[in-house]
Image (cartoon, grey):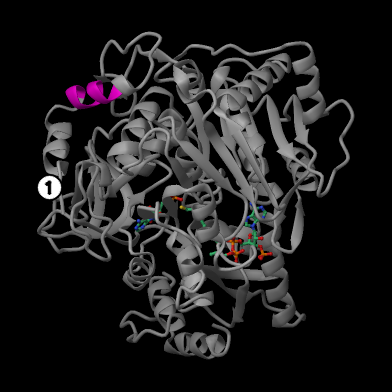
Amino acid sequence: MTTSRYHEVHAQSLSDPEAFWGEAAKAIDWIVPAEKVFDPTLGLYGRWFAGGVLNTCYNALDRHVVRGRADQVALIHDSPLTNEIRKFTYAELLHETQVLGAVLQEHGVGKGDRVILYMPMVPEAVVAMLACARIGAVHSVVFGGFAAKELATRIDDARPKLILSASCGIEPGRIVQYKPLLDEAIALSSAKPGGCIILQRPQQRCELIEGRDHDWAELRSAAIAAKKSAECVPVQATDPLYILYTSGTTGKPKGVVRDNGGHAVALAWSMENLYGVKPGEVWWCGSDIGWVVGHSYIIYAPLFHGATSIMYEGKPVGTPDAGAFWRVISEHKAVAFFTAPTAFRAIRKDDPEGHFIRKYDLSHFRTLFLAGERADPPTVDWAEKQLKVPVIDHWWQTETGWCIAGNPVGLGMLPVKHGSPTVPMPGYKVEVVDEAAKPVPAGTMGSIVIKLPMPPACLPTLWEQDARCKEAYFNEFPGYYKTSDAGYLDEDGYVYVMGRTDDIINVAGHRLSTGGMEEILASHPDVAECAVLGIKDNIKGEVPCGFLVLKAGVSRSNAEIEKEVVALVRDKLGPVAAFKLAIAVTRLPKTRSGKILRGTIKKIADGETWTMPATIEDPKSLDEIGVALKGRV
Ligand code: COA
Ligand code: AMP
């Protein structure tokens, strides 16, 4: 193993952050360089690159075209669901972005205006995000697996001038019509957008509403015919690039704001130093553009870096088989791949001996990165043995925009310890504290916090909600950012992330709030009380399970109501919640002070040993849960 420069680099980033990030900022083209690398007097904990002026799209596209990468492929769209592979060179992607930018401007979108994207995994979605960045507009991508009500909440919060969407998404075995969901969301929302631009996909076209909806392809053709092209609009480093909504502890999602300058600098730094990828190499991030991982590593980071990025519309298994990932890596010669552990669990189930892996030439493939949920040691072990390359777990959140703790391949890898995402990245001073915000000794579990200031790219605030941001992240542990993850540090400074301290669960790498699901269950007219918790699942890591107490006098059967609430969550939150199990019980197990005994219920559901809590109000209620769960989990 080569000696790692990690310790020296991390120490420098903490002892002189301005020198460190000032140097990293040289990888970005600035219209006006920042007056101060970090200004502690601005924002909730200071702002990075205040006074700096740049354009994010210029850094992702134009500068590479100018400097010799015009004919290099920037984006490969590989869709086993449509049997299509489309490639865009940097010059082509730039052209598409200039054209769509002009279309958006013609529809009145200007600097600072919000544009919501409710799109499947198609290259047009990438073009749309870059076009917003180009004209200084703020994009907000809503994941396609979310239902109309979730989309409506985001429309009301962001108040977009325009919404960009498509006629349909494609899931294995079914076409998901996006348009009825979009129409319903707009009907539900009070902030009506000025219009919608709809991409008609040939698999299923949709009706357009006259006066409101416009055909994407027609607008594109007309703009090209009229030689329309949008120039890059200079924005402040501290101006928002995007809003990405993520689950909070209630049904109301948090609008995480990402700035332009810090984002560009941190992401550009990460490509070579963390992921070990060089400009011109092919990189694949198998996430969805609706998640932060997709924003950062399908689109922005690889393009800032002049790499080729693969965008994949498919699944790890079933499209068509458990060899799908190896086919993509081999066919496009990806040197590194980033996905969620859940995908590997799905592959291992279908192909435990790795027969598919050996069907493909993976000789150029160097590293596998995992994130989105804890990489469980058996999965990492299997992946290492099968692929014979380093398997790197790394930990991050929507709020941070990039990795908090990882193993920096480009700086020289540190020894891998299964179960740990390794060490904090530059700028992150990670500590573990007790309830009184006092650091705990190595090996002791506590709340994982990050000493302020956070490094570039981390959230400056929540969209138009400074007070909620402070309350959610900065108040409980003064001087720190609260990650809401629990875990510990070991003697070598390795971080272990063991689970959330709030009501968030992680379902197949998707972050969901059980509190939000409880709000939906409680809205059913026959439900008096309910509790949703995450229970173990061999593939998805966790899946939600709902317990219901029905109102007195309800005459319909439990089974009927259980079915209705399952449908209700799918309808109100979306299929991605994978809420398939609801169980009616006569009472919820509670303490004498009325607190639902979630921890004990979870242990029973997960088949772990449990003891009757001394404070329980009615011991029979736990026995009933045990009986009700039999044969259903
Ligand atoms: N639009 C519409 N519906 C969607 C959707 C989208 N973009 N994405 C998912 N869904 C639907 C699916 O069709 C499925 O519906 P169903 O209940 O009718 O089957 C449901 O939401 C759950 O989808 P998913 O989480 O993809 O589960 P799955 O059972 O179809 O597949 C895995 C399981 C493990 C293969 C899959 O979850 C996976 O690949 N996960 C990796 C996630 C990831 O990369 N996360 C990024 C973090 S780094
Ligand atoms: P999201 O904001 O959707 O990226 O989800 C962030 C949450 O996912 C974190 O707070 C963790 O709970 C979990 N998570 C992400 N990556 C990891 C990881 N490598 N190890 C453990 N938990 C992780």
Q: Is residue 311 above or below residue 49?
A: below
Residue 513 picture location, percent across and down = 50, 56
- Residue 24 part of the magenta-drawn span: yes
Q: Is residue 19 left or right of residue 578?
A: left
* Screen quadrant of the C terminus: bottom right
Q: Is residue 252 above or below residue 61?
A: below
The secondary structure making up most of the magenta span is: helix
Name the foreground residue: 596 vs 1: 1
What residue would you read off at disc 1?
Answer: 3
- Based on the displayed image, in which of its 4 quarters is residue 428 positioned? top left
The disc labelled 1 sits on which kind of residue?
A: Thr
Q: For mark 1, does the 10 Å Cα neighbourhood hold few (<14), some (14 to 19), or many (20 or more) residues?
A: few
- Residue 106 part of the magenta-drawn span: no
The residue segment tinted magenta is: 18-25
Residue 16 picture location, percent across and down = 14, 27
* Residue at image location 56% in from the left, 51% down from the top: 251
Q: Is residue 393 above or below residue 60?
A: below
